[in-house]
Image: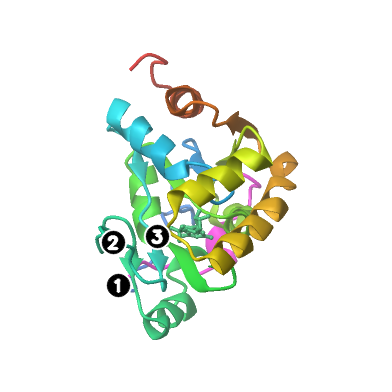
Amino acid sequence: MSGGQSRSAMMNVRDWKGHDMTDADGNVGDASRRLIVLTGPTAVGKGTVEARLREDHPQVWVSVSATTRAPRPGEVDGVNYWFLTEKEFLEREREGLFLETAVVHGLAHYGTPLQPVLEHLRSGVPTILEIDLQGARRVKESSAQLGLEVVYVFLAPPSFDDLATRLRKRGTETESERLRRLETAKVELAAESEFDVTIVNDDVSHAADELWAVIAKEYELPRQN
Ligand code: 5GP
């Protein structure tokens, strides 16, 4: 394990059913396979880049987050998100079932269920979290304790104006919600230097290819796959 200290001495990691997730060495996950954390401001196109990546490389697994926000039209429980009530979410959070959680845009809780992430990493499946900046920072805090190695990838827009245009065109938010998201986006853009890699989403295929290059390197997979 990185850091040379047993994680189980510091944290009790259990799965959704309460089983201990640690192996004989007190580790969780497979430290030789790095988890990919993808972060980027609202409307930068994370979902589109991921969809293209999975089309080209179906072996990649993207974690399904839990959220307390309402489903958008067409979103399916267990596919886009696990849609939970606030009570359900907070109970699971208390039980330590999330790798990280955050309140995003000051509105809803979001969190990454820990167990599926560990299971996919242990099976050697390329694993991606698509989470916000606060979540990425929480993963940074907890990954050492969990014995997880992580690559932090920042998906950036070509410019702030481009981002504002994309958000307006998407049209899924009210005016006040759109402005709130743009404020969050400013803070997120300023944090780019905290990440290991920046990918500029000037073109979806190009960005998906660059993301694949990061994954292929980490998982020792052929660049052309
Ligand atoms: P949306 O509501 O538009 O689907 O997502 C809003 C924001 O929440 C996005 O920036 C997305 O990256 C972030 N998000 C989605 N799932 C998670 C999660 O599990 N944890 C954290 N911290 N952020 C998340």
Magenta residues? 1-16
Left or right of 86? Residue 19 is: left
Q: Amino acid at mark 3?
A: Ser
Distance in Å between CA atoms under marks 3 and 2? 17 Å
Q: Does residue 88 show up magenta in the picture?
A: no
Q: Which residue is mark 1?
A: 17
Residue 65, which numbered label? 3
Residue 11: x %, y % from top left:
55, 67
Left or right of 99? Residue 116 is: left
Q: Give the mark toward the camera: 1 or 2.
A: 2
> Which residue is found at the position 47% from the left and 42% from the top?
46
Ligand 1 within 8 Å of the CB at mark 1: no
| Quadrant where the C terminus is found in the figure | top left
**Callout 2 environment at 10 Å: few (<14), some (14 to 19), or many (20+)?**
few
Q: Amino acid at mark 1?
A: Lys
Work out whether mark 1 precedes mark 2 in sequence or the reverse, and give the earlier one: 1
